[in-house]
Amino acid sequence: MTTPAWDPAQYLRHAGHRARPFGDLLARVPALPGEPPAVADLGCGPGNVTAVLADRWPTAHITGYDNSTAMLDKAQAEHAGPTPGGGRLDFAHADLRGWAPERPYDLIVSNAALQWVPGHLDRFADWLDALVPGGSFAFQVPNNIDAPLHALMRELAATPRWKARLADVLRHEDSVHPPAVYLDRLARLGCATDVWETTYLHVLEGEDPVLDWVKGTGLRPALTVLGDDPEARDAFVAEYRDLLREAYPSAPYGTVLPFRRLFAVARREG
């Protein structure tokens, strides 16, 4: 899978819809043991949801980690510094495939990032070891890799015209595991664990809104690979757009994008 080049502006075009699951995740996180609490946000992106953590825990020292310079620059410019409640927001570069906590945390949280981290299950033990007793590890990931949004993208990339350049570029079906796999792994690591799924019916507006949505996320690897060939990039996007129009027809009130997400909250026993 190609490491995508991220575009903060494109990603934030659907910021409201993308942020809602994070709020639903945080609503299930139990009280944090420390005061002020230390919080790590893994895959913080442009920092807009990292800032939400300061609303929930006003005194917290929060560090957002990401491997995209563009995303970190956006986060740093708009959100870094002291928070109104007396806490602080910082941002730092990290590759989650090898990130090892350098300090104890009351909460390690991740919003729609772990699907981009091959082998992320094997990172859980190290991350949980960094939690203080009573601390929590909480994350949500898209769990819709079988939806038309992704299936059509993979099918198109595997056609003769695109196979040589794109067949091994996109996320595979095993980028997110079944819910029971996460429950089992976290419970065996000694955590009180809550795992659930929710399907959101996002009503999107505008022309080709599903394409606009996926340009900010799942399509990024293909756009990155084809970035030096604008003609090919535009041709691929046009073919994919036509497939999405059939799969997600518009209605008088907008275009409905069903989107299933997987949530987990694991509390380290005190």
Image (cartoon, rainbow, N blue to C red):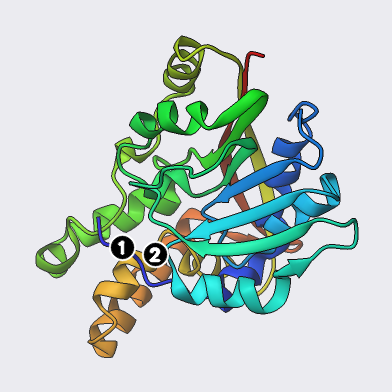
The nearer-to-camera label among 1 and 2 is 1
Q: Mark 1 points at which residue?
A: 3
Residue 219 numbered mark, or none: 2
At horizontal 62% and vertical 55% (from top left) the residue drawn is 63
- Report whether residue 197 is seen: no
Check the picture and name the quadrant holding the N terminus: bottom left
Residue 9, how many percent across, how many down? 59, 78
Out of 69 and 201, give the one closest to the viewer. 69
Q: Which mark is first along the chain, 2 or 1?
A: 1
At horizontal 81% and vertical 37% (from top left) the residue drawn is 35
Amino acid carrying label 1: it is: Thr
Out of 65 and 255, give the one closest to the viewer. 65
Q: Is residue 115 left or right of residue 59?
A: left
Mark 2 Cα shell of 10 Å, populated few (<14), some (14-19), many (≥20): many
Give the SS element for disc 1. loop
Out of 83 and 224, give the one closest to the viewer. 83
At horizontal 35% and vertical 40% (from top left) the residue drawn is 175
Which image quadrant is residue 78 in? bottom right
Most extreme residue toward the front is 103
- Report whether residue 201 is seen: yes
Q: Is residue 130 left or right of residue 138?
A: left
Amino acid carrying label 2: it is: Leu
At horizontal 59% and vertical 57% (from top left) the residue drawn is 64
